[in-house]
Image (cartoon, helix red, strand yellow):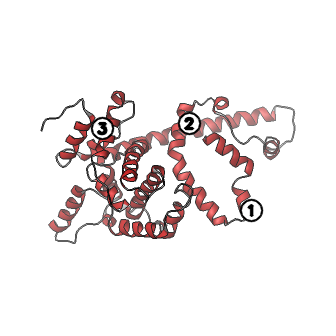
Amino acid sequence: GHVDASDPTDVARYLLQNKDAFDKAQIGEYLGREKEWQDGFALKVLRAYGDALDFKAMPFDDAIRYYLSGFRLPGEAQKIDRIMEVFAARYTDQNPGIFPTADSAFILAFSIIMLNTDLHNPAIKEDRKMTIASFIRMNSGVCDGGDFPDEMLTEIFGRIKNDPISLKEDDDARESAGVGNGKSAATPATLSTAGLSDFFFGSHYVDQDKTREVNYQKEGDQIVRDTESMLRRRRKATKSGSGSKKTLRDSLKKNASVKFVGTADSGLRDEYVTPMFDVAWGPAMAVFSTAIESANGTDGILASIATEEEMDHAVDNAA
């Protein structure tokens, strides 16, 4: 049908009406475009797309399934953030009283996506997969400072475990492949790692991830070589100096008060540091919440994680 390409609401309507005809990976890529792209037009389309969906009285994970049925999530974390932020805001508006803030809904939505990947990724061994207890622990304290009801998280865990989030086209393809070969229908547990990534993020983005991985490895190797070279030069300078027998441990003790390096001193600009923090805060929060939970109030263990001064510095840097 006709679409007004200058009207975000009309473009969103057109994408929804034709979601089964278009490439869902391309729809997801478009909806996740940068905020600055075409003066924010794609972001306006994304918000209009969310506003066109009705999540009233839907269980939270069912609403996520419905939302993600029209497109394939892109592979970049920042694009997923934008897409799920819109979902969380829309769900919270239509279901008042379930979440105290849209941020709480966003965090749980992201946790559910992580859970879906963790439970149904064949590359993760069974004994390493997330359990109900670890899922509850991961979401501890993130509901506006409180906890989500255990019953709610347990029900979500069970539904995701028994019925993974995936696109209808991928389900049909797996079922056809199983029936066509005279075998039982394929399940996520029988798919290869690449196959799982294909049905959740799209093969095009898997190729992009592989390219990024290769480039990352090359860059990492170069960093290692540069570091080794720097250490060799420093050792030579130390030997040719005053002849002091001061050890590395002594130097560290002397500089023990220096815990953090500001971006201005390191040469890094905020435009580089901020995106790294945006990507790292979620996994870091999950790791530290597990560590602190394991400490169970034991001062010695907590002190081994970080001192009060270090935690204050971390909060200041995060702000």
Q: Identify residue for label 1.
A: 299
Query: How crowded is the residue under tag 3: few (<14 C-alpha within 10 Å), some, or many (20+)?
Result: many
Asked if disc 3 and disc 1 are in contact, CB closer than 8 Å, the reply is: no
Q: Identify residue for label 2.
A: 273
Query: How crowded is the residue under tag 1: few (<14 C-alpha within 10 Å), some, or many (20+)?
Result: few
Closer to the chain start, of discs 2 and 1, is 2
Question: Farthest residue in the left direction?
Answer: 1
Q: What element does badge 1 sit on?
A: helix
Give the foreground label among 3 and 1.
Answer: 3
Q: Mark 3 belongs to which amino acid? A: Val
- Residue 22 appears in the figure: yes
Give the foreground label among 3 and 2.
Answer: 3
Give me the C-alpha separation between circle 3 and circle 2.
Answer: 29 Å
Give me the C-alpha separation between circle 2 and circle 1.
Answer: 32 Å
Task: Say left or right for 169 vs 295.
Answer: left
Q: Mark 1 belongs to which amino acid? A: Asp
Q: Position of residue 138 (x, y in %)?
A: 52, 61
- Which dot marks residue 45? 3
Q: Looking at the rendering, which quadrant does residue 183 occupy?
A: bottom left
Q: Residue at x 27, y 42 (%)?
A: 27
Closer to the chain start, of discs 3 and 1, is 3
Task: Say left or right for 258 vs 54.
Answer: right
- Residue 18 appears in the figure: no
User: In this orientation, which residue lies closer to the viewer: 302 or 45?
Assistant: 45
- Which dot marks residue 236? none
Closer to the chain start, of discs 3 and 2, is 3
User: In this orientation, which residue lies closer to the viewer: 204 or 265?
Assistant: 265
Q: Looking at the rendering, which quadrant does residue 5 occupy?
A: top left
Q: Position of residue 220 (x, y in %)?
A: 53, 41
Q: What element does badge 2 sit on?
A: helix
Task: Say left or right for 153 vs 233.
Answer: left
Tell me: residue 31, above or below residue 37.
below
